[in-house]
Amino acid sequence: MPSKKKANPKAKAKAKPKAAVKSAPKPIPHAAADARDRGGFKASRHGAGKASAAGPKADQKKAAEQREAAGAKHVAAAASRFLQGARIAPRRIDGSETVEQLIDGVFLSYNSGRLREAAHLFTDKMLANDVTIGLTLTGALTPAGLGMSCLIPLIEAGFVDWIISTGANLYHDTHFGLGLSMHRGNPTESDVLLRAEGIVRIYDIFFDYDVLLSTDAFFRQIIRGPEFQHTMSSAEFHWQCGKYVAERERLLGIGSKSLLSAAHRCGVPIYTSSPGDSSIGMNVAALALEGGKCIIDPNKDVNETAAIVLGAKRGSAKARAGKSAIAIMGGGSPKNFALQTEPQIQEVLGIDEKGHDYFLQITDARPDTGGLSGATPAEAVSWGKIDPDRLPDAVVCYMDTTVALPLLTSYALAKRRPRPLKRLYDQRPALMAQLEREFRKANA
C-alpha cells in the first residue's frame, strides 16, 4: 500500500479557506470622505468648504486661488467659537481721545488687552453695590505720588472698602501729609555722592534725609499718646495715626495729601501684614524700650480681615449678603494676607465658604519661579482662596502698577458713579461678633 504522508500540524493551523481571507481596505479618497474631508477634522465641526490648518494644504491653496480669481467674498471660519471676539480694528488716535476711549478702543491685545479686561472687571462687576472690595499695596507706590493721584480718589468714591499695605507705603505716604517734599531725580546719579549730600533715593525719587527724621519724630510723638497704650489691631493703629495726620494737614492748609488721613475720614480700615517691617514699626519698637504699651497684635488682624470677608459674603446688619473682591497691586505679603482670609474661614475656623468672587492683579512677577507674587488665580483655587466657579472673573495684568493704576482709576471714575461708603472700620465689632458666632456654630 502506498504510504500516507503525514500532515504538518503547523501548516494545517495556518491554512484558511480562501473565502475567509479578507482583502485589505481600500483608502478612501479625500474628495469622497464626507465625514473627514479635511485630514481627520469633521466637516460638521468647521462647516462645509472651510479650510483647516490640519487639512491638505495643496487643495486649500488651489481653493483660495479659485476664490480670488472669481472675486468671491472670504467668509471662512466665521462661525468658529474661537473667532467670536471683536475684530482688531482700533480707532485712529488723534489726540482727542479720553482714557476710556483708549482702553476700550486701542488696548486690544497682549498686556494692554489684559488691562482692558481688568478695567471691565473692576467697573462692571467689582463696583456693584453688593461687592466689598479689598485693595493690597506692595512696592513703593506712595513715594511716586499714587496715594494722592489714585488711592485717595478711589477711597473717597467708595471704590475701596478695606486695604492691606506694606508699612513702607504708609510711612512714605505720611511725608506728604506732614507737608514734606519728595522730588523727581535721575536714577543714574552716584549714590556715594547722594549720601554725601544727605539725599535718599528710591530709584528715581529723591528726598532729603531729614524727611525721614521728621517723620520718625512725628510718629514717636503721637504714639506716646494715651490712646496708643494698649494692644490693638493694625487697623486701629493706622486709624489713630490717620487722625493726627489729618489734623496736621488742616493746620498746614494743604488739603488731603495722605492715604492715612483719607482712610480715617472715610472709615476704611488699613491693615499691614508685617507691622515690624517698616520705619513705623521700628519706632513702635523703640518706644517699647521706654516702657510704651503700644502693641500691634497680628491675631486681631487675621481675625478682623476674615470677619470682613465673611460679612461681605453672609451680609451684616449694615448690608445684605453679597460678594468679595480683591484688587492686588503688586503681590508679596499683602497679597497673601488678603487671600488667606478664605482659608482662615474654611480650613482653620471650619466655616462653610467657597472663596473670593473677584480677583484682579497687577504684577510684574512670573508664576514659574514659585513666588506668591506671581501665583495665578487658578493656583489660588487649589488653596480655597478663590471660588473655582468664579475663575472667569479673575484677571492678571503683567504691568508696572505705576502705569496701570492711574489708567484703571481714571477709567473707573469716568464709568461709574461713587458708591456709598461702607465704613467697615466702624463695623469691626459687629463683624467680629458674627465671625465668633459662626465659629462656635461650626465647632460646637
Image (spheres, grey):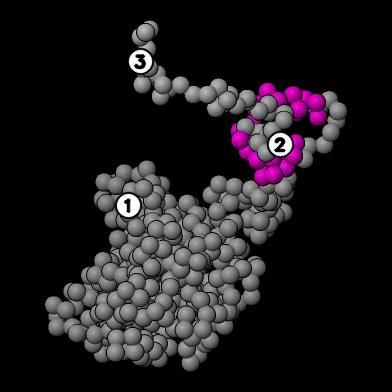
Q: Residue at x 67, y 45 (%)?
A: 45
The image quarter in which residue 411 lies: bottom right
Q: Residue at x 55, y 53 (%)?
A: 114
SS at circle 1: loop
Residue 426 got which mark? none
Question: Is any atom of residue 172 visible in this view?
Answer: no
Q: Position of residue 361 (x, y in %)?
A: 46, 60
Three-letter code, disc 1: Gly
Depth check, front residue: 95 or 244: 95
Depth check, front residue: 367 or 169: 367
Three-letter code, disc 2: Asp
Q: Earlier in the sequence, mark 1 or mark 3?
A: 3
SS at circle 2: loop
Tag nearer the camera, 1 or 3: 3
Alpha-carbon span between mark 1 and mark 2 = 49 Å
Q: Earlier in the sequence, mark 3 or mark 2?
A: 3
Label 2 crowding class (10 Å Cα cut-off): few <14, some 14-19, many 20+? few
Q: Residue at x 55, y 22 (%)?
A: 18
- As drawn, 37 above or below 222: above
Q: Which residue is mark 2?
A: 34
What span is in magenta?
40-67
Q: Residue at x 44, y 76 (%)?
A: 162
Three-letter code, disc 3: Lys
